[in-house]
Amino acid sequence: MHVWFFDAASNATLAADFKKLGKAAGIGESVNDVRDFLGRMQEDWLLIFDNADDPKVELSKYIPRCNHGNIIITSRLTEVNQIASSGAHLDFFDLEQSEAVNLLLKHAYQNLDNNNQQLVFDIVNALGCQALAVATAGAYIASNPTCTLSNYLSRFNQKHTELLNYKIKSLDDYQKTVFSAFQLSFDQLSLSTKLFMQICAFFHHTAIPVEVFNRAAAFTGDDLEPEEEKTPAVEELKHFLSLFTHNESWDNSIDELSRLSLIMYNIGSKTLTFHPILHICIQETIINKDRVHHIALLFLARATPDSFTHVDYKFRRLLIAHAEYIYQNNLSTLLIHKCLANIFYDAGLWVKAENIYQKTLIYCEHYFGKYHHNTLRSKNNLGYIYKELGRLEEAEILQKETLKLRKKVLGESHPDTLTSMSNLASTYSELGWLKEAEMLQKETLQLRKKVLEESHPDILTSMSNLASIYRQLGRLEEAEMLEKETLKLRKKVLGESHPDTLTSMG
């Protein structure tokens, strides 16, 4: 069998390889000459079209028109499947862990033993068992005496660019590095899709909800404070969103990335997942990382609901991994502060939530003054976090101060004032000051019944809290009656699967 290998990266490389074959066979050097020659040839042959990753390459022009011979095409393009006959298409995924381990050790010229087994597993898992990345890691370790299995990941985290561009020295003529292989596909993307990918690079690489982008598409800047509106990142976000002016725009970018096998799209959950190495490669294409990071933060902030319905709670839970990944200390807008704090709050990540609420309070006091509703809300939230962290004395001091200010600014029956009363009563309860807790929680419940609808969730919260105090006081009959009433109303208002209903049932 005759076997010929063609570089299908571009029309130019294909034409050059066909010309070489035509010249060697003495049949003419044009693509048509070689294609017709192969069509007439009676002996069996195999053509390998490698790296056919550019949609502008018309592979059909190079395929002989005959019923014999064999062809292998390697490509990241899903549309190449259409060229193959039925049943002749194979998807190649990442290596199995055992295969990746063998590949790493082969290129590193090392053997697996009890001392290095976990190190090897850590490396191949961090590289997502991607064949070229694993082989490159092994070759780099073999070629650099100061780099070992024990310190490779540390060096990789510090020197992404150098290691992603490391070229394996081999006897064949394969010239691609991990990054250059990615760059070939990246260069084919439209501008809007490139920007879309770069924003995704600041989210966690797994399960990015497409709903984040749908929600952020409504961004106008109206919910920013005046001093935040003219920042470069806000202007760039508005420009970016102008590229996605109709409902199908996000779908177009997702389809474009899927065709080049640059993402995995889960139709059921409507989420995007990037290979971890690809995710790092995307970051290497970004010139102004701080600016794009800020835009990604604004995306997340705009998409994060500020209310506390069951639906909002569930959506914020989907964002926890992304909030942790994207979080840095240099947060820039109140909108971003509130978004991340709410996500960490829902997740019970109290220390991170405390850090952000402290910064938010300083920010609000500086820009709005001590009586502004944003400042009072930040102070209230920080007091609640102190309570959850078990710092009850600090919580009590801050909550009393917040309640005093809210009564002065908003009045005694304002919903925010009543929230502060309820929070302070809960802190009294945890401090063991049960009489004080009962008095304040009763007052809160009475006022809430006056100003809110009978079935409002805040009223149900007060009823539940008061029942808990009765139970602590040993007044079990009163506690049980109030708990039953609360559960009945919560089932009716919130539904049986709402967290508050489940708490009452427990």
Image: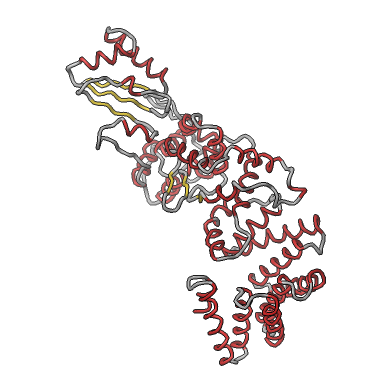
Residue at screen point 45% across, 31% down = 181
Q: Report whether residue 352 is seen.
A: no
Residue at screen point 20% across, 15% down = 41
Image spot of residue 249 (x, y percent): 52, 40
Locate residue 335 relative to residue 66 in the image: left or right: right
Residue at screen point 26% across, 35% down = 88
* Residue 304, image quadrant: bottom right
Task: Between residue 80 and residue 379, name the one nearer to us.
Answer: 80
Q: Is residue 60 above or below residue 116?
A: above
Quadrant of the image containing the N terminus: top left
Q: Is residue 321 above or below residue 251?
A: below
Image spot of residue 277 (x, y percent): 48, 41
Image spot of residue 303 (x, y percent): 59, 52
Residue at screen point 76% across, 65% down = 376
* Residue 284, image quadrant: top right
Q: Is residue 312 above or below residue 276?
A: below
Q: Which colour assignment does the render follow?
A: secondary structure
